[in-house]
Amino acid sequence: MSCPVGRERDDEEGKGLHYLEYLKIPELLNLQQPLSKSAENPNGVHDEHLFILMHQVYELWFKQILHELDSIMNIMTADFLDESLMLVINSRTSRIVVILKIVVEQIKVLETMTPLDFLDFRHYLSQSSGFQSLQFRILECKLGIRDDLRISYGGSTYKSAFSDDRHRSAAEQLEQATKNPSFLTLVDRWLARTPGLDGEFQFFDKYSKAVREMLAEMKDEAKKETSLSIRNRKLKDHETQTKFFKQLMDVEEHASLVEKGQRRLSHKATQGALMVALYRDEPRFQPAYHFISSLMDIDSLLMQWRNNHSLFVQRILGDKMGTGGSSGYRYLRSTVSDRYKVFLDFFNLSSYIIPRWHIPKLTSEMKDTLGAYFTADGEKRRAGGGESHHSGAEKD
């Protein structure tokens, strides 16, 4: 099969756009310019070429991730989300996941460089550092990492890397990324509109009742134990679970945890996420459950990337100070924590999952709202029409 590039741009002589021109290959391949090049060594230090190219590849992947994320966020800013667009959202979110898997793995190429190889050209880097990656900072801001949870870098914030006049444009881009609603905010609003939270079904009231019944059963079973050690263990388990569920049930305590940075989602959005998780088998919740799972994948992969990056720096620098003035490995290692998890609440959701036999039964109306079925003539019907189950327009 021939390449379709240039078919619609043939000039008068019938010459189509060439592959080299379309992808600007000559310009692309000329972007690796080692600073160690000299008259005596026209190619520069051998491994500096690898170092430059690998970081440029990272930046290209970051650009594509931002391209996908922006498109998803544009869809999710709408007051009403057409349910058919969940396929687009999930497709592009899954693409981000696949890209991040590549980003995580490609550091293995850099790990072929030894500490001696790096020291051959490190002094040419001056104060440049990966901390100054504008695209990665924009990505963090757009995802929704809170400024008050970040680790300071050499006594400065991440914005300080773009504070001088030379990088005024970069600073403006970063500022714009922090002003607009984050991806986390859009996800929160979307989950807060989950059908069944309000109206006739009142999911959280039913769920809270089921939790109280489950905890009461746990306590009764523990008290029946004849073995003192087993009884005490079960009572301790009951106490721990009661504490977890109290954090969820108490709106004020949840708000306090959000303020402290131990929770990310609003109480209403947490209810929505929990409902999706418990009723994930319902047709209209399946795309939402897939979406939530992909968001956890994004967080997990970014954590893996941070971890791999910190280990690479330790391998190549040990305890030496980073090029940008940070503590190097120790700073990077400190970012591998829940502070930098955007969708932390989805990971913690497992604490509130109850056994299937305790899950409140859906009413026939709610079952119909979340279902999809075929009529006798084979026509597919869906309650609520084409609007998303998170549009806020459902009628319980």
Image (tube, rainbow, N blue to C red):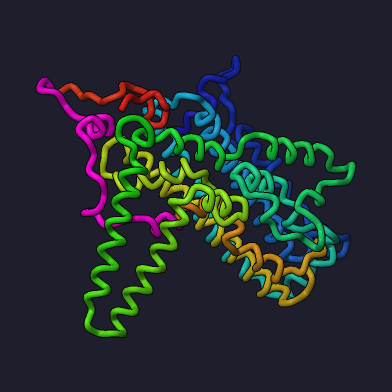
Q: Residue furthest top?
A: 12
Q: Position of residue 182 (x, y in %)?
A: 60, 39
Confirm whether residue 378 shows in the render: yes
Residue 233 drawn above or below residue 79: below
Kindly identify the residue that appears in the image at 19 percent across and 29 percent down.
373
Q: Could you say which quadrant of the image residue 117 lies in? A: bottom right
The one nearer the camera, 227 or 371, is 227
Q: Position of residue 163 (x, y in %)?
A: 85, 46
**Can the viewer see residue 1 in this picture?**
no
Q: Is residue 233 left or right of residue 79?
A: left
Residue at the spot 42% in from the left edge and 39% down from the top edge: 90
Q: Is residue 351 above or below residue 62?
A: below
Where residue 36 sits, quadrant-wise, is bottom right
Residue at the outermost bottom position: 228
User: Looking at the image, which residue is at 10% across and 22% down?
Assistant: 376
Magenta segment, which residues?
348-377
- Name the residue located 62 percent from the left edge and 35 percent from the top edge: 181
Quadrant of res 260: bottom right
* Pick the front one: 21 or 174: 174
Q: Is residue 262 left or right of residue 287?
A: right
Instruction: Report x, y in % for residue 109.
Output: 59, 64
In the figure, is residue 305 to the left or right of 86?
right
Q: Is residue 375 magenta?
A: yes
Q: In the image, is residue 40 part of the stretch drawn in magenta?
A: no
